[in-house]
Image (cartoon, coloured by chain):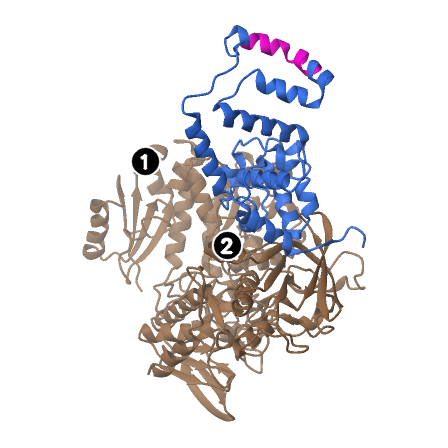
Amino acid sequence: MDKKTAIYICTGCGIGDALDIEQLKEEGTEDFSIDLTKDHPFLCGQEGVDIIKQDIEGEGINTVIIAGCSHRVNYDAFNFGQGVIVQRVNLREQVAWSQPPKEEDTQMLAEDNLRIGCSQAKDTELTEPFKAEEEYSKDILVVGGGLAGMTAALETAKAGYQAVIVEKEASLGGFLGKMKKLITMPYKDVSESGAEELIKAIEENSKVKVYTSSTVEKISGAPGLYTVDIKANGNGASERVGAVVQATGWVPYDANKLGHLGYGKFKDVITNVEMEEMAAAGKITRPSDGSEVKNVLFIQCAGSRDPEHLPYCSSVCCLVSMKQATYVKEQNAEAVNYVLYKDVRTVGQAEDFYRKAQNDGSVFIRGEAANVGEAGGKLFVEADDELLGERVKIEELDLIVLAVGMVPASKPETTPKIKAPADTEGADEDGMMEVMPDSGFFANSALNLEYRQGPELPTLKYGFPDSHFICFPYETRRTGVYSAGCIRRPMETAKAIDDAVGAAMKAIQCTEVTAEGKAVHPRAGDMTYPEFNMQRCTQCKRCTEECPFGAINEDEEANPLPNPTRCRRCGICMGACPERIISFKNYSVGMIGNMIKTINVPEEDEEKPRVLCLICENDALPALDMAGIKRMKWSPYVRFVPMRCLGSMNLVWIADSLSRGIDGILLLGCRHGDDYQCHFIKGSELAETRLSKVSETLDRLALESERVKFVEVGITDYDKIPVIINEFMETIEEVGPNPYKGW
Amino acid sequence: MENMVNYNPSFAEEVFRDVDSGDEIKMCMNCGVCAGSCPLREHMDYPPRQIFGLIRAGKREAVLSSKAIMLCTSCYTCVVKCPRDIPVMDVMHGLAHYALKQGYVPRKDTANFGKEFWNQVYKLGRIDEKDLPRRVFFAGGFVEGIKAMLNFMDIGLKLMLHRRMKLLPERKIKGVKLLQKMLDKAEGLGKGGIAA
């Protein structure tokens, strides 16, 4: 495309008062071929926008550089359609609002920002959406036919899309089908499970196809283009789908590990799941002799919230025990239910059911079971009553119910340990140690994805699929695969229904945007995708290894096989590639390199240091904007270059900048680790890992390692940003100017 | 184990059935706000929450002989603060009355004061500011009575100076018979009523 570039400088919002606009027009654009330069005091207003539109039509301008506010605002006003490249340059939050007006340093900052923008616009190409050769499917595969699975399939059908359910049991229903009653909104009383109606609705719906006694043998392809091989009753079947909802549910925690609570030792100690099944089958009796049940004790948190067993709270067991207490009361009005609890966790409105249970006369005892035994054919429990501060004994019990927690069905029996570097005791010669991994690809077989990184969803340490819990709960680390219900986290029925609806909506959204060639979250609507210059590939496998979403497969010769519809466009592969062969139409190693090269580096004797800040545009950049909006001040020597994700940072930029005489490099990215906030899960972590290897480069250039620093920033940390910058500037001052200046 | 408490629901059932407002404690969720807000907490042997815990565990003796149930001054703080809307104060008074009825006297002075106070209100429809202290002070014997009188002499003189205490005996209020009828009816409404 032949570019005709125009620059529009907005002088509103204090920009005109802070800068010499004429000088900016001259100095900021001299190295670029610009066809038109205009300024306007209110560019985002109708008049300003009309001027731009007239130029696009009249002058044939197709590349518009808008120097004014942050790109995070007014993007709708400055949208001129598909054929026009719009480049935003920040002169407001980062310059006029955060720097003293009419000063030389402020002016230089604005000029650099404009130059960076011009350079970026020069290297940006018009995007063309990815279009696969095959036809896109918009059907949804739902793995698991329990409450969440059935709801997801029905919601999909209601929205007008086809759904396919694959259920491993002979009939639909999952655990819902095994329940006698359920508790749901408004939590005043127990209600019918509704499983039969739900199954009937599925069977009657022509848009839902059901495979029972079936498993997913293989899912190959990518979102919009999945081919699913189903093993149904011994026969094979194949379906083409656009997205997948995994609702494979939960299994109870293995009570055989709870010998200390009498399970396995006494026949009348059962789990809450066994209790539910017994109640659903008819009468609740003592398993040992089939006699009547009068006194029942529920032990809450049986194995839950216990580092030795299940370290987390399953959030449903309290309600379940209260529900089962109503079964006992219903059967025998004289019966006494004891509930031995650590904390009653009946979340939200479910508190009403707790009130009901108390009003019905259930005895709640706060404490932990210390001993379970048998005397005279009846059971007894000794417990430490926290409120009395004494050990108490509850005798004459007919039945003890252990309220065991929920384990995701994807959690394997054993989690393999991994070797990780450690500097503590017990490390081997190579400094490695066997540890429990925080996350990994150890899920039980359910999806059998044909992905190079593994056949299942990456899970967190307790076996739940990894997802960005705050911002994108349903999304997993596989684009197009969404998790719903108790596979995602332990939850009660009302929440599982919500979850299923949400996941079905996300799956539909995915098939739609994929067919349009756009990215799903978090870069929703982005039409670029990574392109590989395969001639220069050295088959190092870094891109296929590091992609947090498993987007890139591999052939036998280790050549990467990209799947653009699996891609989230973070650019982590671009940062990983040592040969720099991966690029996007509007984001590439060369482009960022050129942008950095336009930064004017003054001579050493001018005493104006230059610091490059590579800043994550998801959280750190908004925080910086916010600091600007709050009129906070920071050093004028810092030049910000936004990154799609810090994981797309390529080390060559660091080496290039330092060899040009830039004094320091600051990287601002998201928090990583157990409670990561990175929108691309591993991006900021990978950036820091890569950065740890930059010391070699620094050594080669004989530079101090303090010149490069990585700082984790949350989106709410706007107040810390000026502090971080100023502290780094102090460090740079101590280290002194970069000796490569002027070379 | 020696001090092991055997859970026994029979006392809880007794309290639910026979104590005024006793069934309200079913709804207690052991948050402890009542104990935390009670101004007399430090003088109590068991805070209200623990009293409820003891009832649930079936420790009849400990509850009915507890000083706490007689210490309540009806300040209403616990009632206002209870997240489960339990009238903790009413429960405490209910328990105190029940204890007295069952022959327990957790605090002799309080019980005696309550009895004299009630008798006077019932008889006169008001309090006689010299007669009530006299009866309370001398309940422990003549010497004790004199000591207590001397202790409160200053207050007594001031009360007289401000005409809060008359020299002559107080007279009955008008319509004391009607008041007595009302009080009798109120007594009949409760489960245990006041101690005789």
Query: Seen in the image, is B75 located left or right of residue A419?
Result: left
Residue lying furthest bottom? A235
Residue drawn at 35 percent across, 53 percent down? A87
Query: Where residue A355 is drawn, which disc sits there?
Result: 2
Q: Identify which residue is drawn at 81% across, 64% down.
A: A429
What hue does chain B carry in this figure?
A: blue
Q: On the image, which quarter does residue A94 sit in? A: top left
Going by the numbered disc 2, the residue's amino acid type is Arg
Nearer to us of marks 1 and 2 is 2
Q: Residues within 10 Å of mark 2 (few under 14, many from 20)?
A: some
* Part of the protein shown in magenta: B147-159
Q: Give the chain letter for brown.
A: A
Check disc 1 and report the residue beneath it. A16
B80 left or right of A25 in image: right
Element type where label 2 sits in the image? helix
Vertical comparison of A489 with A695: above or below: below
Query: Is residue A569 in view?
Result: no
Q: Position of residue A705 (x, y in %)?
A: 65, 48
In front of the other: B181 or A32: B181
